[in-house]
Image (cartoon, rainbow, N blue to C red):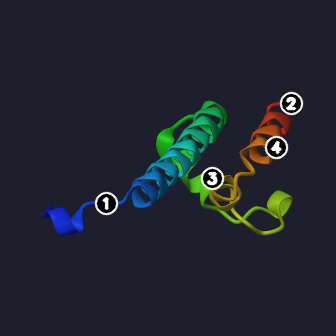
Amino acid sequence: MSKDEQLTDDAMAALRARFQQQSRKAQAYYAVMHEVRGLVGSDDAANSWMNQALPAFGGRTAAQLVGEGRENEVLAHIRTLRT
């Protein structure tokens, strides 16, 4: 990277914020996957469940909801399936 291409402080702050946001999304996705894997028994089954349109979510997928920051709703739903 040349001197002319160096990131400004604002650009660096924006990159950090973007990284933190993506990290939070990944952690949320992992937490939901962990819960559903315990219910369905495998990573493949959990992945299928995460990407299946579900009536409980208005035809949306768990992955979509997690991507929107609604992982608590998905976790609450998973816990109702255990009973």
Q: Which residue is mark 4?
A: 77
Tell me if 55 is positioned left or right of 49 in this view: right
Task: Give the secondary structure at mark 4.
Answer: helix
Identify which amino acid the numbered label 3 is placed on. Answer: Trp
Q: Which residue is mark 2?
A: 83
Q: CA distance from mark 1 to mark 4?
A: 43 Å
Question: Which mark is first along the chain, 4 or 1?
Answer: 1
Q: Quadrant of the N terminus?
A: bottom left
Q: Which residue is mark 3?
A: 49
Please report the residue visible at 52 percent of the width from the left and 51 percent of the height from the top.
17
Q: Which residue is mark 1?
A: 7
Question: Which mark is first along the chain, 3 or 2?
Answer: 3
Residue sitting nearer the eye, 72 or 82: 72
Identify which amino acid the numbered label 2 is placed on. Answer: Thr
Question: Which mark is first along the chain, 2 or 1?
Answer: 1
Question: Which mark is first along the chain, 2 or 4?
Answer: 4
Identify which amino acid the numbered label 1 is placed on. Answer: Leu
Q: Position of residue 42 (x, y in %)?
A: 51, 38
Mark toward the viewer: 1 or 4: 1
Task: Give the secondary structure at mark 1.
Answer: loop
